[in-house]
Image (cartoon, rainbow, N blue to C red):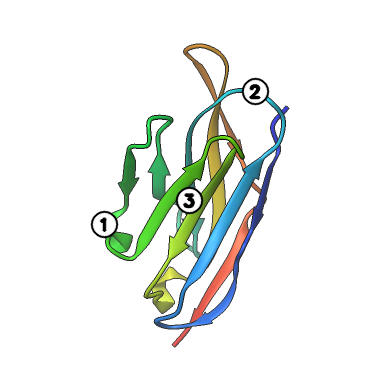
Amino acid sequence: QVQLVESGGGLVQAGGSLRLSCAASGSISINAMGWYRQAPGKQRESVASISSGGNTNYTDSVKGRFTISRDTAKRTVYLQMNSLKPEDTAAYYCHVLIEPVRGILYPRWGQGTQVTVSS
């Protein structure tokens, strides 16, 4: 089993920064890792992802402000969020694809961490 433990959320003023972390327990191989967010009344959306090879993708609204990275040895993914805006306020969820058998992928979700940006 793989459990995801997130940390780093909180309350910050507009223009500030936060760093989210998500550590995966266990020893099952992990493929891609990423972050989603969900604001009240809105659908959950992908914020950023990073492949096992280190390729990254970002939603347009965070490009140039957020940086995703991973430490494979620590089975941890990070999201550095700079120049935060009130519209970034949401619950942020860690998302990973575990690969117990080569080529077979299963999604796993973290419990979510709240990010609130005040204007």
The amino acid on which the numbered mark 2 sits, given as a three-letter code, is Ile
Identify the residue shown where x is 45% and y is 54%.
43
User: How busy is the neighbourhood of tag 1: few (under 14 within 10 Å), some, or many (20 plus)?
Assistant: few
Badge 1 is on which residue?
60
Please, what secondary structure does the residue beneath circle 3 have? strand
Q: Please provide percent x and percent y for residue 105.
A: 52, 21
- Figure disc tally: 3
Q: What residue type is disc 3 on? A: Tyr
User: Along the horizontal axis of the image, is 64 left or right of 33?
Assistant: left
Q: Nearer the viewer, mark 1 or mark 2?
A: 2
Disc 2 crowd rating (10 Å Cα; few below 14, some 14-19, many 20+) is few
Quadrant showing the N terminus: top right
Q: Disc 3, disc 2: CB below 8 Å? A: no
Question: How packed is label 3: few (under 14 Cα within 10 Å), some, or many (20 or more)?
Answer: many
Q: Residue at x 71, y 36 (%)?
A: 25
Residue 44 vs residue 54, the one in the foreground: 54
Residue where numbered disc 2 is placed: 28
**Label drawn at residue 36:** 3
Q: Position of residue 85 (x, y in %)?
A: 39, 76
Q: Amino acid at mark 1?
A: Asp
